[in-house]
Amino acid sequence: MTRKTIVLANPRGFCAGVDRAISIVERALEEFGAPVYVRHEVVHNKFVVDNLREKGAVFIDDLADVPPGATLVYSAHGVSKAVQAEAAERGFQVFDATCPLVTKVHKEVARLDEQGYQIIMIGHKGHVEVEGTMGQLPAGKMLLVETVADAEAVVPDNPDKLAYVSQTTLSVDETKDIIAVLNARFPNIKNPHKEDICYATTNRQKAVKDLAEECDIIIVVGSPNSSNSNRLREVASVRGVDAYMVDNAGYLQQEWFAGKTKVGITAGASAPEVLVQEVIETIKNWGHETVSESEGTEESIVFVLPKALRKEQSANKS
Ligand code: SF4
């Protein structure tokens, strides 16, 4: 009888930006006590958000819900200039948990705008990172392109003074196709870094592509609103492998594994390893005996905390 196995993607789970964002909320709670207000879910993971909520974090989407004098944390996805201005005007103590790789895109938008470029944002409409990045400029100034069809139809003011930036958690392959259309239609379009998809998204998609080569089913641990987790499931699915995304082990269904001999497991950048371990245990209970870790790209990136929250971080490490 064929031995049923589990292979774990490498890398998977938390990235440096998520690690930093969670630490900022935890440290703010330690330093200033509950409640600490967080604009939007600090990272898109239900387990993480519920955990921080229990410790005293209050998640809000509208600054009108934040009382005067409160401590406010911006989520890892970043915020618009309008949100920053409102927070400053209302005098909140603000800690910015925007991932530095998202901040880099915000700075790029400001620079390109100063140089007179009209900017196309490649990203998903309504995603909070896209709202934050497009909100670096006044409403309506940037153009949003979500798909190849959008790229074929977009009408800029001046095709010779055009640039693009992208959301950090897109599908690498789909974004390449969109960029190819933009380059073909607008040969003078400025593309500072090709695209802004971050190292964590790129590495996790590469790892799941490799898994899809050898597995007959892929499980992605991630919450439904996590962009990078959704992309991991799609990357596996377009390769013809059964792929499911689950928030936790409770969502697994035993019939998915009938006749499957090799299960690949990965996790989105906001999904903690504890949830992966619970998924492994459940699948093992259903008869997959061995667990191995695939070879992959080593990640060593760490982002430092804001200065005011750093003291204990250094003390813990010493
Ligand atoms: Fe930063 Fe990428 Fe992680 Fe998002 S997925 S928080 S951009 S490192």
Image (tube, rainbow, N blue to C red):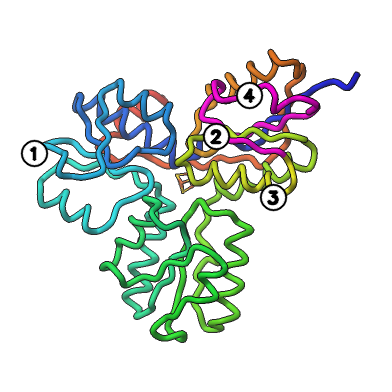
Q: Position of residue 20 (x, y in %)?
A: 40, 37
Q: Disc 4 marks which residue?
A: 253
Task: Count residues near mark 3 (Cα–Cα under 10 Å), then give few for <14, some for 14-19, many for 20+.
Answer: few
Q: Identity of the amino acid at label 1?
A: Pro
Looking at the image, tell me whether mark 3 or mark 2 is earlier in sequence order: 2
Query: Is there a contact, CB below 8 Å, between mark 3 and mark 4?
Result: no
Residue at x 8% of width, y 39% of height: 68
- Find the magenta span and give its range: 242-267
Circle 2 residue: 13
Asked if residue 46 lies in the magenta stretch, the reply is no
Q: Nearer the viewer, mark 2 or mark 4?
A: 4
- The three-letter amino acid code for the residue at tag 2 is Gly
Label drawn at residue 68: 1
Which amino acid is tagged 3?
Answer: Val
CB contact under 8 Å: marks 2 and 4 = no
Where does the C terminus fall, quadrant-wise? top left
Q: Nearer the viewer, residue 58 or 190?
A: 58
| Nearest to N terminus: mark 3 or mark 4 | 3
